[in-house]
Amino acid sequence: MAECFLVLRAGLFTTVQDLGRSGFLGYGVPLCGGMDQFSLVAANLIVGNVPGCACLETTIIGPELEALCAMEIAVTGAECSPMVNAQDVSMWRTLSVKKGDVLSFGSVRGGCRAYVSVKGGVDVPVVLGSRSTFVRGGFGGLSGRALRNGDVISRFSVAPLSLEYSLSEKLLSRFADRVEARVVLGPQEEMFAEEGLRMFLSGSYKITSEADRMGYRLDGPLVSHKNGADIVSDALLPGAVQVPKDGRPIVAMRDAQTTGGYAKMAVVISPDLNVLGQARPGGSVRFSRVSVDEAQRTSREYLKLLNSLSSMLVKN
């Protein structure tokens, strides 16, 4: 273990995240993990880590971090204007920093969350199979909370990279204020009026200020039920679109509770949940329907891309 960053300013909401914890939903423990898993995996691969190493996930206003050692880092995800010693640096590529260098962030031009990887991975205790922070539960990450000024971040000690890498330009994520998300209807599709389903699939929804790692409350065309919104509570997974009695959809995100008592009209497919995880309050989202077969095919293609991403890195 080696100390790697002193947190000079913590930013709006910066946490330690990896690919999340699985196998504990039955005990009420959410999946957690990076909201944009593509960007997290890319950040790790660019510094020579395995895909699931823990990174820092920043939100809108990034932190200011002083390097406590020489190391390789990468910044991916939201277009967040990263700087080292007040000089602009590139995203999606290996960056070498020296002891005393200060990594900071300017204005976010697109997206919401950026990922800062360090060679070796962020070193925090494993809790239930993951280093991801679950703030509402108070565990994982750094003492179960977002970073604070004065925190010291450690990494696993590893040999430095012999080469530097960047992600191929054609694979770089681009984020807009308007998001398109594909959904599979159900599992309680039959509880919604035909007009409600039509409005959901044809309307545009604003992402309200009630949007965080747990879920996004949307504002737009109201979705009508046939005979009420309540169900006997059942399983809830990231991507599920719940609709309470007020008709305003709520999209469950990575830290969502594991059960819910509102009818679910649709589920966002996995690849598009990454894109939605980069959407900011004030942005908009439109939904389009796909079949289960198409959703499965798209998800297989996405997993194939993730598994082959290391072969698509460019040596600099």
Image (cartoon, rainbow, N blue to C red):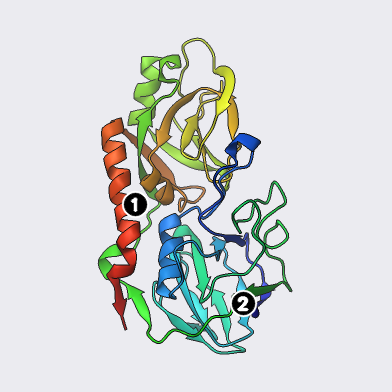
Check disc 1 and report the residue beneath it. Answer: 303
Q: Give residue 143's position: percent from left, percent from top.
A: 73, 60
**Residue at (63%, 42%) from the top-left corner?**
29
Q: Give residue 219's position: percent from left, percent from top.
A: 49, 35
Check disc 2 and report the residue beneath it. Answer: 65
Count the marks.
Answer: 2
Residues packed near mark 2 inside 10 Å, few (<14), some (14 to 19) or many (20 plus): many
Q: Is residue 115 left or right of residue 181?
A: right
Q: Alpha carbon of mark 2 to alpha carbon of mark 1: how far?
A: 32 Å
Q: Secondary structure at mark 1?
A: helix
Residue in the foreground of this view, choosing between 207 and 132: 132
Give amino acid for label 2: Leu
Q: Is residue 48 visible?
A: yes
Q: Quadrant of the C terminus?
A: bottom left
Residue in the foreground of this view, choosing between 313 and 63: 313
217 is higher (above) or lower (below) than 277: above
**Residue at (45%, 20%) from the top-left corner?**
188
Residue 284, picture quadrant: top left
**Residue at (45%, 23%) from the top-left corner?**
223
Q: Secondary structure at mark 2?
A: strand
Q: Residue furthest top?
A: 227
In the rendered structure, find residue 131 and report the number of the disc placed on it. Answer: none
Q: Give residue 166's position: percent from left, percent from top.
A: 35, 75
Q: Earlier in the sequence, mark 2 or mark 1?
A: 2
Q: Quadrant of the N terminus?
A: bottom right
Give amino acid for label 1: Leu
Q: Give residue 268's position: percent from left, percent from top.
A: 40, 38
Residues packed near mark 1 inside 10 Å, few (<14), some (14 to 19) or many (20 plus): some
Residue in the foreground of this view, choosing between 209 and 293: 293
Residue in the foreground of this view, choosing between 136 and 44: 44
Residue 43, picture quadrant: bottom left
Residue 126, picture quadrant: bottom right
